[in-house]
């Protein structure tokens, strides 16, 4: 999985967490929107090393409608 593909998939996940679905926008640029089969423990190991990980929790940057970012952040425990 390339870094760019991971960014695209992450953008989709964060949009779903925010309560919207940006799949059509991503697909219009031929970007992937789903992870291939993967090992969840491997993914969590990478998420624990992510720059957004603070004190064992990961921050998600959420978006609202197009061009309207949400100010609040969602925390997800990685423990």
Image (cartoon, rainbow, N blue to C red):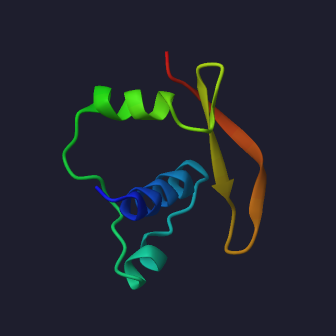
Residue at the farthest right position? 71
Residue at the farthest top position? 79
Quadrant of residue 57 within the rendered picture = top right
For the residue pair 68 and 11, the one nearer the viewer reads as: 11
User: Would residue 4 be found to the left or right of residue 70 on screen?
Assistant: left
Write the residue at 41% across / 34% down.
Answer: 46
Write the residue at 47% across / 34% down.
Answer: 47
Residue 38 drawn at (x, y percent): 22, 41
Say if 56 sits above or below 44 in the image.
Answer: above
Residue 73 drawn at (x, y percent): 72, 41
Quadrant of residue 27 within the rendered picture = bottom left
Q: Quadrant of the N terminus?
A: bottom left
For the residue pair 21 and 37, the one nearer the viewer reads as: 37
Say if 22 sits above or below 70 in the image.
Answer: below
Write the residue at 36% across / 63% down.
Answer: 33
User: Would residue 10 be found to the left or right of residue 75 on screen?
Assistant: left
Residue 45 drawn at (x, y percent): 39, 27
How many numbered marks have been drawn onto this rendered protein structure?
A: 0
For the residue pair 57 and 64, the one nearer the viewer reads as: 57
Residue at the farthest bottom position? 28
Residue 65 drawn at (x, y percent): 68, 69
Say if 75 sits above or below 70 in the image.
Answer: above
User: Would residue 70 be found to the left or right of residue 48 on screen?
Assistant: right
């Amino acid at each position: 999985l390339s870094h760019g593909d991971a960014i695209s998939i992450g953008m989709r996940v964060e949009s779903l967490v925010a309560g919207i679905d940006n799949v059509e926008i991503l697909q219009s640029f031929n970007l992937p929107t789903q992870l291939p089969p993967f090992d969840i423990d491997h993914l969590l190991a990478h998420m624990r090393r992510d720059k957004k990980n603070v004190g064992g929790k990961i921050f998600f940057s959420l978006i609202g409608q197009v061009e309207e970012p949400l100010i609040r952040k969602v925390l997800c425990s990685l423990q």
